[in-house]
Image (tube, rainbow, N blue to C red):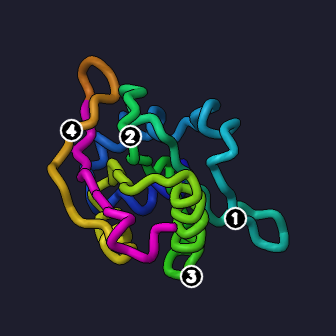
Amino acid sequence: MGLSYRVLMAGAYPADLLAQALPMITKANPVLLASGRYGLIEDDAGRLLACGGWSLERPGSGEMVEGLAHIRHFAVRPDAVRHGFGRQLYQWCEDAVRAQRMTHFECHASLNAEGFYRRLGFRRGRELSLRLNASLTLPAIEMLKNLERHGVQS
């Protein structure tokens, strides 16, 4: 996440904000990693190309809403962008969420990621200000997807 966020978020956020935010937003969430809901894509040499997952708990609050799942900690190596790795991980997440009978996805997307989520069928929700600590917030965008409208719900 560190390399991806540092490079790909640079055009969307001021350098001083990123310098403060990156150490906080690139830490792996141990609960998410251990949940079985986080995936990795590596190349043949074992180099990490992309990562991402989902949770039932809303980031930052732990709140759970019936039928709602959350996209979490997606990142793609800058030199692997636009090769379908992010889409492949997203599809893995959506398949798992549908199997759990979730009907909606929500994502707190960085400003540079809005286009990626839009191409996956998400719509823009409200603008967010993610509190990273007592004095630091990161602008983000709520992205929403109704899974019942995108494919057959079994």
Q: How many residues crowd mark 4 within 10 Å: few (<14), some (14–19), many (20+)?
A: some
Q: Which residue has dot 3 on it?
A: 83
Label 4–label 3 contact, CB within 8 A = no
Could you tell whether 11 is left or right of 27 in the image? left
Q: Please, what is the three-letter code of the amino acid marked with disc 4?
A: Ser
| First in sequence: mark 3 vs mark 1 | 1
**Residue at screen point 43% across, 76% down:** 151
Three-letter amino acid code at the position of disc 2: Glu
Asked if the residues shown at circle 4 and circle 1 are in contact, with their CB atoms under 8 angstroms apart, the answer is no
In the structure shown, which secondary structural element does the residue marked by tag 4 occupy? strand
Q: Judge whether residue 141 is colored magenta.
A: yes
Q: Mark 2 to mark 1: distance in Å?
A: 30 Å
Q: Residue furthest left?
A: 126
> Residue 43 location, x and y as percent?
76, 71
Tag 1's secondary structure? strand
Residue placed most toward the observer, 19 or 111: 111
Q: CA distance from mark 3 to mark 2?
A: 34 Å
Circles 3 and 1 in contact, beta carbons < 8 Å: no
Horizontal and vertical percent position of residue 2: 54, 48
What's the magenta region?
Answer: 137-154
In terms of secondary structure, where does tag 3 sit?
loop
Task: List x then y, in percent, for residue 30.
Answer: 64, 31
Labelled disc at residue 66: 2
- Could you say where residue 97 lies in the image, as x and y percent from the top left? 53, 55
Residue in front for this viewpoint, 75 or 17? 75
Please tell me the numbered disc located at residue 41: 1
- Residue that label 4 marks: 129
